[in-house]
Image (cartoon, rainbow, N blue to C red):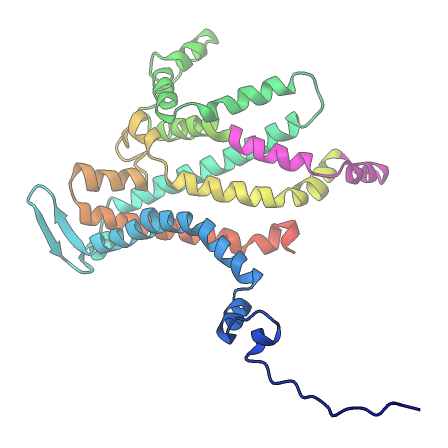
Amino acid sequence: MTAPRGPAVSTPPAHGADTARGTGRPDRWTDRRGWWTGRRRDQLAGYLFITPQLLGSAAFVLLPLGLIVWYSLHEWNVLGDTFTYVGAGNYRKLTGDPNLVPALRATGLFSVGLVVLNLGLALLLAVMLNQRLRGTTLFRTLFFSPVVVTLVAWTIVWGFLLQDNGGVNGLLKTAGVTGPNWLRGDWTALLSVVVVQVVKNVGLNMVLFLAALQGVPAELYEAARIEGAGRWIQFRRITVPLISPTILLTSIITVVGSLQVFAQIAVLTEGGPGTATTVLVYYLYQQAFQFHHFGYGATLSVLLFLIVLTLTVLQWQMRRKWVFHER
């Protein structure tokens, strides 16, 4: 027989969810603890880590950029201690400046020559040094060593070498060739500056290309050789597509750097002869710091920023057409 059950004893309702769990804490603590999840903690840690970078970018990139735009709307005469609002006057002056077109032409010629020679020579050196030959480590060091040399010191040394009676013409004279005055001719001056810059920085792109080449699987080359593909076909069909992300990176870096060249021009040619090597950055320097037209110099800075931004965006948008991993 089953023993009779006693009357059911009802349990009083708990005072809040946490009280029912035995914590003794009020409901609002439960809600707050539910909001403070691990994901939110990770987000806060991430924001704290990037805060110094954001503050630095705001203080040294965004703020100066905003000030440059503000200055371009004014005419600032430091000697006369005047700061006059002119609106779009500096931009109208920009469209009618007869010296702007030669500066843009010199900038374009310099950039094209630098990018083509730098990337082409860097890729060639990387392919050669990627071979397992004796002495490649020494040559890697030799080609990369100019990168770590101070830019001004490097340019001064080349200034002596490129003089009319300098080392370059002395070397040519031993071969029976009379060299020109490299830094005083219209086309030789620009060519000299391009070559000095290429020799200075080709080692950096060479190292980047070399790292990319060493990441290409050797099995692909073996399979291509079995199928009868020659070296050129292997390079064009295997090497170039697989290192195309590095080509994109180096091209953006080199293009931006070519548009910002200044020290080489200032030390070697000072924009001469005439305006043959007066690139946009040096013309900006002349207007702002030699002629004290700070408002117009700021306008040229805005133009330079727009050119760099446009070329960078175009290169980035074109990546889907020729970068292998973006297809």
Taking the image as shown, residue 254 lies to the left or right of residue 94, namely right
Q: Nearer the viewer, residue 183 or 217?
A: 217
Extreme-top residue of the structure: 174
- Does the stretch in magenta take in 59? no
Residue at x 49% of width, y 44% of height? 252
> Which quadrant of the structure image shows residue 208?
top right
Q: Nearer the viewer, residue 233 or 185?
A: 233
In the rendered image, residue 299, in percent from the top left (x then y), is placed at: 25, 51
Extreme-right residue of the structure: 1
Q: Which residues are magenta?
A: 203-230
Residue at x 26% of width, y 32% of height? 274
Q: Main secondary structure of the magenta part?
A: helix
17 vs 196: above or below: below
199 vs 35: above or below: above
In the rendered image, residue 177, in percent from the top left (x then y), is placed at: 44, 13
In the rendered image, residue 25, in percent from the top left (x then y), is placed at: 52, 71
Q: How many marks?
A: 0
Taking the image as shown, residue 138 lies to the left or right of residue 225, namely left
Taking the image as shown, residue 137 lies to the left or right of residue 48, namely right
